Image (cartoon, rainbow, N blue to C red):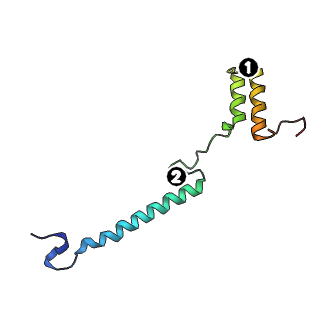
Amino acid sequence: MQTLAHWGGGSGPGPWILFVPLIWAAVVIGAVTVLRRTARRGRGVPWRPVGVERPAGDSPLAVLGRRFASGEIDEDEYWRRLSVLEEQFGRTGRGGGTA
């Protein structure tokens, strides 16, 4: 019975050995492509479409403002949470007051 290692009656590995470098080349090219796409976007997700970015309103202050505007929290709760955020992250860029 012939095996792949002795294809065609010879004692050599046969032409199938050419696929080994092709498989390694495909693995290396795929890894380089994934790493380049990840680095280009800078967010670590290589499969995100090019035009899709993180919404600008995802900051804690923006979320707090949206919750206040939609009525989820009242004014007292808004100011209390805002003061906690200012203590954690520093001044928020609001006008007036001292730093």
15 displayed left or right of 68: left
In this rendered view, identify the residue nearer to me: 53 or 5. Answer: 5
For the residue marked with disc 2, what is the amino acid?
Pro
Q: In which quarter of the image is residue 14?
A: bottom left
Q: How many marks?
A: 2
- Look at 77% across and 26% down and name the residue there: 80
- Residue 65 vs 31, above or below: the answer is above
Q: In which quarter of the image is residue 11?
A: bottom left
Instruction: Judge the density around disc 2: few (<14), some (14-19), many (≥20) Cα neighbours within 10 Å.
Output: some
Mark 2, secondary structure of its residue: loop
Q: Position of residue 20 (x, y in %)?
A: 32, 69
**CB under 8 Å between discs 2 and 1:** no
In this rendered view, identify the residue nearer to me: 41 or 3. Answer: 3
Say which mark, if any, is on residue 97: none
Q: Where is residue 35 in the image (x, y as percent from the top left)?
A: 52, 59
Instruction: Judge the density around disc 1: few (<14), some (14-19), many (≥20) Cα neighbours within 10 Å.
Output: few
- Look at 67% across and 40% down and name the residue there: 56
The CA distance from mark 2 to mark 1 is 40 Å
- Residue 23 vs 74, above or below: the answer is below
For the residue marked with disc 1, what is the amino acid?
Asp
| Nearest to N terminus: mark 2 or mark 1 | 2
- Look at 78% across and 37% down and name the residue there: 87
15 displayed left or right of 26: left
Mark 1, secondary structure of its residue: loop
Viewer-nearest of discs 2 and 1? 1
Q: Position of residue 43 (x, y in %)?
A: 59, 50
Say which mark, if any, is on residue 46: 2
Read off the residue under disc 1. Answer: 74
19 displayed left or right of 93: left
Q: Where is residue 17 in the image (x, y as percent from the top left)?
A: 27, 72
